[in-house]
Image (tube, rainbow, N blue to C red):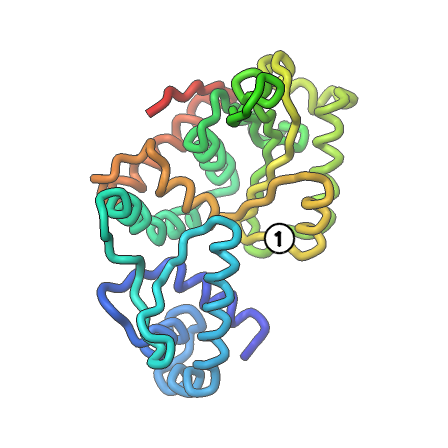
Amino acid sequence: MRQFDKPTLLRWIYRSEYAGIQPFRDVLQQGATEALRKDVIGAEAYVESNLNSFWGYLMKAQEADERRGISRIVDIVDPMAMTMRWYTPPINQTLNRRMARLRHRPATLKMIDTLTDREFEALACVAMTFAGASNTNLTPAGNEGGVDFFSLIPSPGRCHLFSGGVHPLRIIGQAKKYSGPVPVDKMKEFLTTINEVKHGGEAKTEKVVPAWFHSVRGPIVGLMVAHSGFQAGAETRARRHGVITSDSLDLAELLTLSRFVPAHLSANEHIADLRSRTATFLGQGQITISMPRP
């Protein structure tokens, strides 16, 4: 198995959806054909050589997703027979609403794949509003001083010192629509930008900071959204400096499960709604949006 075959296949699985119980062998063979571009004979040979290896890889990936708060893409029906199905059948009304929304995640990921760099930045702003931001700014294109967006995220607290309404998180955001993981040097640059905003040392950076960002009290936190994730060194450096890291799977999860999305929407309607919200940020340039509670 080539080095990037497993992540390529996993990426394909996240963007796929099947009805009913499926043999993993059949799913992997289709993935080898569509994602790895193998012919029928090559796909069959690939499955025979890699079935158990990729099954274990998929199980570990699902466990890693759960640890970071991401919903499993599939449920294992029979681990011995290697059969699975997409999503858990609803057993109550609350779960039914969640599953109805989660079924749009593959389509949302496919939509994110098609975005330009600038559209990806605007979609990150949409995600901030869905996350409960009271204010979100998309910075001007091409002259943003290393910052793509700013946000205020209220958070619950047991006393006034840690109350999000009084001391919201002040988010400095950057969005990277890279085809591969973000390297260490880009994370280093972002850490420098965060310090420039904190200390006001650079005129180019300071001119894009909205007035409301400095008018409130609260911790300043960096957030980098990377379409294809991060290199290990970049992830480690971000963790040590308190920078929040996320990828397109995080975005898709947030954008599909948000209460701002009516559960009755079809996948196409949901995608159209996201594109409309993204266009709102793009069309108005540097804007501030105050999102009411649903």
Q: Is residue 177 visible?
A: no
Q: Position of residue 19 (x, y in %)?
A: 23, 64
Q: Amino acid at mark 1?
A: Phe
Observer-nearest of 284 and 247:
247
Vertical arrangement, residue 7 with respect to residue 260, above or below: below
Q: Quadrant of residue 161?
A: top right
Q: Position of residue 115 (x, y in %)?
A: 44, 44
Vertical arrangement, residue 180 with respect to residue 147, above or below: below
Would you say 93 lies left or right of 116 here? left
Would you say 93 lies left or right of 255 here? left
Q: Is residue 264 visible?
A: yes
- Identify the residue at horizontal 66%, vertical 50% (top origin): 235
Observer-nearest of 208 and 263:
263
Would you say 109 lies left or right of 186 here? left
Vertical arrangement, residue 224 with respect to residue 132, above or below: below
Would you say 252 lies left or right of 199 here? left
Q: Quadrant of residue 20?
A: bottom left
* Figure disc tally: 1
- Identify the residue at horizontal 30%, vertical 66% (top origin): 85
SS category of the residue bearing label 1: loop
Q: Position of residue 60 (x, y in %)?
A: 51, 66
Residue that label 1 marks: 230
